[in-house]
Image: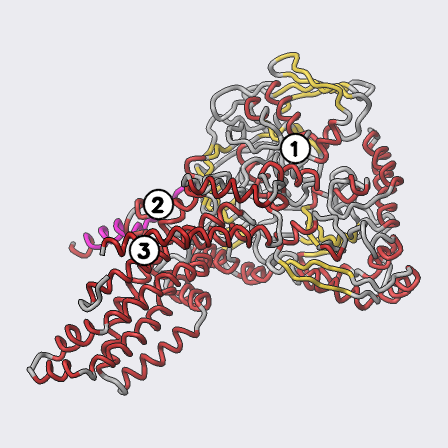
Amino acid sequence: MRKLVALVALTAAFGISHAQDKVLRVVPHSNLSILDPVWTTAYMSRNHGYMIYDTLFGTDEKNNIKPQMVESWTESPDHRLWSFKLRKGLEFHDGKPVTSEDVVASLARWGKRDAMGSALMTFVDRMDTPSADTFRIFLREACGFTLEALGKPSSNVPFIMPKRVADTDPFKQIDDYIGSGPYVFKKDEFKPGDKAVYVKFAKYVPRKEAPSGTTGGKNVYVDRVEWNLALRDAQAQVNALQKGEVDIIEALGFDFFENAKKDPNIQIPKYSTVNLQYMARFNHLHKPFDNPKVRQAVLAAFDQKQFLQAQVGVKELYNTCASMFTCGTPYGSPAGSDIQSKSNMKKAQELVKASGYDGTPIVVMKPTDLASIQKLPDVAAQLLRQAGFKVDLQAMDWQTLVGRRAKKDPIDKGGWNMFLTAWQGHDIWNPIANPTMDTRGEASGWFGWGKDDKLLALRAQFMRETDNAQKKKLADAIQTRAFEIGTHVPLGEYSQPMAARKNISGFFITNGNIYWNLKKN
Amino acid sequence: MISFVARRLLATVPVLLIVAVLVFLMLRFAPGDPAAILAGDAASTEQIARIRAELGLDRPILAQFGIWIGNMARGDLGESFYYKMKVATLIGQRLEPTLALATLTILFAIAVAVPLGVVAAWRFGGWFDRALMGFSVLGFSVPVFVLAYVLIYVVSLKLGWLPVQGYQRIAEGFGPFLRHLILPSFTLSVIYIALIARVTRAAVLETLGEDYIRTARAKGLPEFRVLVHHGLANAAVPIVTVIGIGIALLIGGVVVTESVYAIPGLGRLTVDAVLARDFPTIQGVILFFSFVYVLLNLLIDLSYVFLDPRIRY
């Protein structure tokens, strides 16, 4: 009896509990700091957005745009008037109904921040709200990507917020986190760098369809989701998963993949059909990459396999991809890629000689603290040297790189020639979303500032084209031109493994980090 | 004594001011752009410029310094660029884990190291002494993260006795609080055990050669009393000094331990702030640490009065 009492006392004192709770404990891929998913393009903020907000449309696992908050919609024959009706029962976490005014205000704010949203807004003449559950978009001319923009799955996602929140200056962060999504954000429990907590929104009315991508029924089977923001050491994450202290690791390190597969308590769920793509980006403003012939020589030198073997290393997790638009998505195609995919080092060396390269050292920025891409610059430097370039490989932390790549200054004043990065597939899967296709030179949005009027003209045609077959042809033409001028170098694709305890079920193809439909047994 | 304390407290003002200026300048001249980090990977240069203006980073450095120092004078550490929260709130949130870890570590280190050092001095040249010296070398040499991983593997994963990571606030129960801190504290304490034990041994060894020890023994005092009341008590000043230095070093040492054990403390906050170029948070945390250092030194100096009656201020 004494032993029993002692055991009970010990259990109570030391908090040893075997109760089966319904708390899903997740280790996200990074820290959550910014809670406004329209203000930043950070993926963590986007994932936070998916927890608490809903979207008008979504993208399913086969990359089709499907309605989410929208019940039905019509498009005028001239493609200039779009009318949308909202589903019944949509409600914000504060109990107020979602109305068309909330939608229009949210779209207006998103349209000032997102690249695709901004492109859409150049077509929009006005938006109005004939009734509380109906909104209309009037276009100046036909636009070929209206639904793609409204249903875009990655940053910045057009999340629907209450009008009072969406009216916030788009260049200021919101501080009211009321949404109408399947989870409610527990602001009082949020500790940056420690944890973020979401609880089930009991009044959320899921769609009847099965979940797929960011569409379908957002059914919630757990009471709480806790994001462990403090656990960022890769080995410690795996230890915690093995011990059952966490349920899911969003981004399992490649080094731990084989061991995790062998662990009887761990599963590697398939959650994505769209891979991530590595990319080498040129600075088109300065020598030697202001010369398209030099850029072509680099395209010829950069054999994707060498980058993938060095960086990923696990064969089943990577594949070469000759497309600048993610392979396996509607515009993924090898069009125009021969300069890279059918090339070799000998040809690269010939191209370097023929390009008029004057021996200017190429500054390649290498982030030493970002395991997911840190080996790419070493491979790039080696291949560049083999091709006949002089290379200045400069090591720095990622945040220094992020600051430096925004500089247009010449090399001797802190500028740069090349950096390497990775993109989630849906951020580069079409000519509008893919930032490297914005070739307006210094006016263009993304670092590298490529300039090419021909590509811009093709892109403008793509934006206006409403026929899918024609859009595909135009995307091929755009990519062919991008390879001709060498906007950047695609370096192959990889799948980011996720790891979970075996008692977690309900995973589906989300192409992202989404936490509805999951059950904890 | 009171005037000494007042003078020392007043002296903290110029010290903190110098730290403030140095930190401010170092951060402004360090590479990296907080606006680019905040904007996200796909942000345009125009968006980054807008954010830079919003944060006030487009103003001249002198103007930025003026605003910051003005806020500091009013006791406002500013707002984090990254988290949009008051820096003082962030420090407050992270103080408990770091304080708990540091306190438990130093208490554990003192409880183990001082007796070990005394015994080693008492048995100078014997096997215990040599073993302690060997342990000290090991304790100094093994990196904290290596020790942490080994302990986690054995104690948590293989034996299943303690959690592998995390922190439970004391308000959530003393048991879980302690369970989560045992491994990190032990990990971190090893180097301090080595340091304090060596200094204790050396200090006690020196006092054991003094005439008053011989006298105490000649009077027939039990050896325990000789060691503790005469040997250890007279060796207290260097021991307390090294403990004080240890506490100061500990504040830096918690960074690695907090990372490996996923403890959301001030060390982790500092690393995150540096990586994100979150200037207000870095400045706030460093100033806070500086203040703690100054205060600790003052407390150590004051403790000498009680440990050695010959010392007067």
Q: Amino acid at mark 1?
A: Gly
Give the residue at x 81% y 24%. A142
Asked if the residue at tag 3 contacts the one at tag 1, i.e. Cβ–Cβ closer than 8 Å, the answer is no
Q: Closer to us: mark 3 or mark 2?
A: 3
| Residue A7 lies in the magenta stretch | yes
The residue most toward the right is A354
Query: Is residue A44 or residue A467 the one in the foreground?
Result: A44
Residue A68, image x, y percentages:
62, 28
Residue beneath disc 1: A58
- Residue A105 left/right relative to A222: right
In this rendering, the answer to whether B284 lies above or below A297 is above
Residue beneath disc 2: A19
Residue A9: mark in rendering: none
In magenta, the rendered stretch is A5-23
Q: Chain of mark 2?
A: A
Q: Quadrant of the N terminus of chain A?
A: bottom left
